[in-house]
Amino acid sequence: MKLGLFLFSEYVAMFVSSAIMAILFFGGYNFPGMDYFAESPNLLAVLGLSVFFLKIFLFIFVFMWIRWTIPRFRFDQLMHLGWKVLIPIALVNMLITGFVTAWSNGWF
């Protein structure tokens, strides 16, 4: 039972993080055309809740899709990716962003 709850907690965390992403970045229960349902607030509440759960399940689908299609990396592969690929790309990105910002502000 303990292992079952441990494995279930992973999906609960996935649901909660999907809900937070839907609320913070994708408008929560808002959807295009909400103004047309202003005269029936009960229908608007049901539609808003349905849209919210649809957004959550869309994020869960994306999570699972990525987790099931991309192979898992070993620890040494992750360290190689982080130190030798991603950090140099991030440094070059910071330099380019700094030069573009300085050039657009007229500092050069």
Image (cartoon, rainbow, N blue to C red):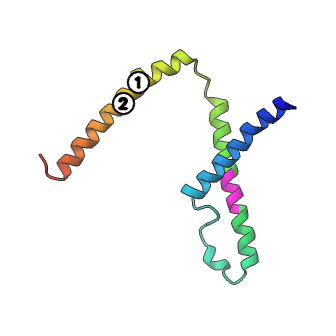
Q: Amino acid at mark 2?
A: Ile
What's the amino acid at mark 1?
A: Val
Q: In the displayed structure, would residue 92 be above or below residue 40?
A: above
Total numbered circles: 2
Task: Provide the secondary structure element on which disc 1 rests.
Answer: helix
Q: CA distance from mark 1 to mark 2?
A: 6 Å
Q: At 20% from the left edge and 51% from the top edge, which residue is drawn?
A: 104
Q: Main secondary structure of the magenta part?
A: helix
Q: Nearer the viewer, residue 34 or 3?
A: 3
Report crowding for label 1: few under 14, some 14 to 19, many 20 or more residues within 10 A (C-alpha): few
**What residue is pinned by disc 1?**
85
How packed mark 2 is, by other alpha carbons closer than 10 Å (few <14, some 14-19, many 20 or more), is few
Numbered range of the magenta stretch = 51-56
Judging by the rendered image, the residue that carries numbered circle 2 is 89
Farthest residue toward the bottom? 39
Tag 2 secondary structure:
helix
- Tell me if 43 is positioned left or right of 26 in this view: right
Left or right: 51 in relation to 79 = right
Location of residue 31 by image quarter: bottom right
The quarter in which the N terminus is drawn is top right
Q: Where does residue 4 sit, x and y in percent of width and height?
A: 83, 32
The picture quadrant where one finds residue 71 is: top right
Asked whether 66 or 94 is in front, the reply is: 94
Residue 8 inside the magenta-drawn segment: no
User: Where is residue 27 shown, x and y percent of the image?
Assistant: 58, 62
Percent position of residue 47, x then y? 72, 68
- Is there a contact, CB below 8 Å, between mark 1 and mark 2? yes
Q: Is residue 59 left or right of residue 46?
A: left
